[in-house]
Image (spheres, helix red, strand yellow):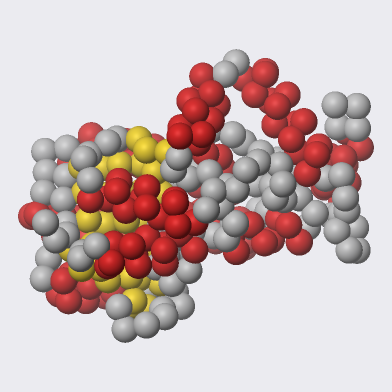
């Protein structure tokens, strides 16, 4: 059966790979992206409701209705939780958390009409608050809450899944890496094509409420959800300490320097 799909963040990373996979399997897909690439992707700024309303309406018209919405657009910038949140933190919240809310609201009538499905792409970091990623963690943890609220309110007509990818080497991690605080090498990277396959299956396959991107990620999410908080904090600090063994060119930002000194004995 052919599904009509809208996916945000469709011009790069997981979104691009997922859109391509769905199309290869005969599904009709319109992508939305701030920087559209190709005739099947429309310009859309998920932080602006007028832009969202316009793009979603055009996509639904092109598709002749809507069966699945995949909220995949996301950004990541590092900050210090003890400093005043700046524009980068506000952008993370606006794109990663408010963006899915905006797009879903614009698509809701069509989704209810088709008795469709929403898939919100969260992260394993919804359950693991790493240092120097407060906005990202807040946005992904908040997105789980949004999925649950949406499911409660509209369970009579739509299905809502939350998807939890692990570490995938995409440009979203570049800002942290540039500041000398990255996850590369600390955890196994998941191939983007494998994650895209799992996300595509979540979108059009048998309904599941919560889906991780792989078997190891399923185990990881389960462990993080149920591990005693003290042990999880220790594991996070050990991992974060390893992530700061080598300073970037120009040195660490002051907040990271303080963290390195504070965790020297961990």
Q: Quadrant of the C terminus?
A: top right
Task: Left or right? Give the position of 30 relative to 74.
Answer: left
Q: Residue at x 33, y 70 (%)?
A: 31
Which residue is at the front of the view, 215 or 244?
A: 215
Identify the residue at horizontal 41%, vertical 63% (top origin): 17
In the rendered image, the residue lying farthest to the left is 113
Q: Position of residue 167 (x, y in %)?
A: 57, 47
Where residue 136 sits: x, y (%)? Answer: 57, 48
> Can the viewer see residue 150 in this picture?
no
* Rendered residue at 71%/55% (across/down): 176
Spot occupied by residue 264 in the image (x, y as percentages of width and height) = 91, 32
Q: Is residue 88 visible?
A: yes
Q: Quadrant of residue 261?
A: top right
Q: Examine the rendered structure and indicate whether residue 229 appears above or below residue 237.
A: above
Res 170 quadrant in image: bottom right
In the figure, residue 46 lies in which quadrant? bottom left
Q: Residue 159: x percent and y percent?
A: 20, 42
Farthest residue, direction bottom: 39
The relative height of residue 228 versus residue 188 in the rendered view (above or below) is above
What quarter of the picture does the N terminus occupy?
bottom left
Decide: is 74 above or below 149. Answer: below
Closer to us: 253 or 66: 66
> How many numbered marks have been drawn onto this rendered protein structure?
0
Q: Is residue 219 left or right of residue 42?
A: right
Q: Residue at x 60, y 57 (%)?
A: 169
Vertical relation: 244 (above or below) 8: above
């Amino acid at each position: 059966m052919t599904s009509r799909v809208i996916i945000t963040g469709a011009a790069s990373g997981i979104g691009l790979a997922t859109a391509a996979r769905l199309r290869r399997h005969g599904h009709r897909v319109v992508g939305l992206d701030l920087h559209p690439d190709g005739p099947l992707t429309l310009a859309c700024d998920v932080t602006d409701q007028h832009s969202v309303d316009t793009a979603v309406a055009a996509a639904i018209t092109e598709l002749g209705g809507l069966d699945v919405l995949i909220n995949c657009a996301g950004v990541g910038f590092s900050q210090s939780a003890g400093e005043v949140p700046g524009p980068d933190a506000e952008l993370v919240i606006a794109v990663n958390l408010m963006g899915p809310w905006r797009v879903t609201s614009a698509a809701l009538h069509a989704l209810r009409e088709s008795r469709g499905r929403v898939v919100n792409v969260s992260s394993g970091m919804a359950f693991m608050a790493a240092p120097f990623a407060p906005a990202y963690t807040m946005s992904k943890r908040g997105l789980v809450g949004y999925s649950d609220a949406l499911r409660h309110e509209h369970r009579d007509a739509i299905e809502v899944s939350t998807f939890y990818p692990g570490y995938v080497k995409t440009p979203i991690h570049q800002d942290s890496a540039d500041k000398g605080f990255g996850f590369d090498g600390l955890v196994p990277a998941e191939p983007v094509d494998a994650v895209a396959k799992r996300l595509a299956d979540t979108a059009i396959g048998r309904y599941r409420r919560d889906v991780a991107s792989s078997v190891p990620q399923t185990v990881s999410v389960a462990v993080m959800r149920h591990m005693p908080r003290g042990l999880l904090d220790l594991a996070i600090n050990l991992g974060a300490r390893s992530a700061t063994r080598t300073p970037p060119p120009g040195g660490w930002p002051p907040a990271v320097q303080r963290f390195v000194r504070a965790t020297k004995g961990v």
